[in-house]
Amino acid sequence: MNLFDILGPVMVGPSSSHTAGAVRIGLAARALLGRGTPRRAHIALCGSFAATGRGHGTPRALIAGLLGMEPDDERIPDSPRLAREAGMDVSFGEEPLRGEHPNTARLHVEAADGETLDMTASSLGGGRIEVVEMNGLSVLFSGELPTLIVQNRDQPGCVSDVTGILAGEEVNIATMRLYRDHPGGSAVMVLEIDKPVAGEGLARLRAIEGVFSVTYLDARRAL
Amino acid sequence: MQTLEELARAGEGRDLFEAVLEDDCRERGATREDSLSRMGALLEAMRRAQAGYDPTLRSGSGMAGGDGARMRRYARERGGVCGPFVGEVIAQAIEMGESNACMKRIVAAPTAGSCGVLPAVLLPYQRREGLRDEDVVRALYVAGAIGQAIATQASISGAEGGCQAEIGSASAMAAGALCYLGGGDAQAVCHAAAIALKSLLGLVCDPVAGLVEVPCVKRNAAGAMIAMMSADMALAGIRSAVPPDEVVLAMRDVGERMDASLRETGLAGTAGTPFGICMRERIQGGKATP
């Protein structure tokens, strides 16, 4: 842990795992949906989120993240009202853990244009999170480095097209993981990169044949 | 820096803060200016959080809120058993803990539950001694380095090590920071931290209904008091008989032996009292709605 993992973050209380981490989970879902504030969200709280989440403001923190607030936003306690004003319909439920970290939420979010996202994420403590499931696929990323999430059809050449474009943009890849449901089915590439990708680079990635969506999470902003 | 021994060595013959700043720049690939401005922003955020205390706020459970103002009024009007300065420290520690419980903006140091300890000793001391912000920022580096050594060798998480890992670590960090501001050398700083940590060894994490309220808020005041006491002992030349890193490892060992019911699960300790059980049933009995 570095010095600023010990001192900080600046955050709205009361709990870095149940409040700050929950805001980040909401933010991650918003960023991965990529359509601004969702029209509808159903959130299942699991494990300790279900047991003590309400007293820690976890539901309000998750809503705040979906609205695009950062963990230090003092409007977090007021997020249910702000969600109503923004026209976002939110419901909550509880589900048992399926082997995940005790602080876990499963989100189903729906954008105004009908696009949906299913995401499961866990809060690890200190405000750090990891996304462990996305649209039915097991994934694993934290968003602590600039991260590209590419959803594509599982077909030859996709990985090479993506890495080729990044090489052309002089972006170095720190880590890369591939996930798919079955051969030829839907796949996700998660790439942690050393510097941001410019808008043009993202456009070129999105234009690759077989790529459905490209989401860019900036460590310091989106998460 | 991974250990207090390394920290003490790094500060030999030079300003301890400089050694920590260099280490941070190296570790994060940051410039000196970036690092200093980020730490300055944390100090400013602590001060704002302190100034933003609202005595009328109550936490969702109704258990936390208003006591900081009660303490402040008492200390101002009657001086108190400990005198006005310590009364101010106690009031500030409770206020910050209450602000955290009431979903106000705070600075985790090292955790949200222990956010009141460091500012409660540093801000009143700065005012009394007329210190510059620059000096307090330097003390924050020293505090952070102590926290790093504890986190690396043991833990700063209540779920892993009990409250000794949260309030204990915060108190050790604050003790070292105060000792540094009081003119102590790197050895004295590490011993101040060790004396504080030793004094809180074995403290369990037993939050009523799992919430960061009871007994967490008042333990911030306890951590602040022990930090002041430990800094004064170290500045007087008293040393921890047990070497500082061995104290950290003892904290880890105690945390590992601690039953899970006493590590943030809200099952035993004050959480397991009839009052605690009644509160848990009342709070967790409801549906998970905001």
Image: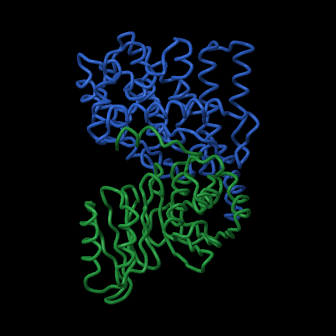
Chain colours: A green, B blue
Quarter of the image where the N terminus of chain A is located: top left
Disc count in the image? 0
A56, A205: nearer the viewer? A205
Q: Residue at x 39, y 33 (%)?
A: B144
Q: Is residue B83 left or right of residue A27?
A: right
Q: Is residue A35 left or right of residue A151?
A: right
B204, B66: nearer the viewer? B66
From what the image shows, is residue B44 above or below residue A158? above
Q: Residue at x 60, y 32 (%)?
A: B48
Q: Most extreme residue toward the front, as rendered?
A: A200
Q: Quadrant of residue A124?
A: bottom left
Q: Most extreme residue toward the bottom, as rendered?
A: A184
Residue A24, position as x, y percentages in the image: 51, 57
Q: Residue at x 33, y 90 (%)?
A: A184
B233, B184: nearer the viewer? B184
Residue B235, position as x, y percentages in the image: 39, 12
Q: Residue at x 35, y 67 (%)?
A: A201
From what the image shows, is residue B76 above or below residue B140? above
A171, A95: nearer the viewer? A171
Residue B57, position as x, y percentages in the image: 73, 40
Residue B184, position as x, y percentages in the image: 36, 14
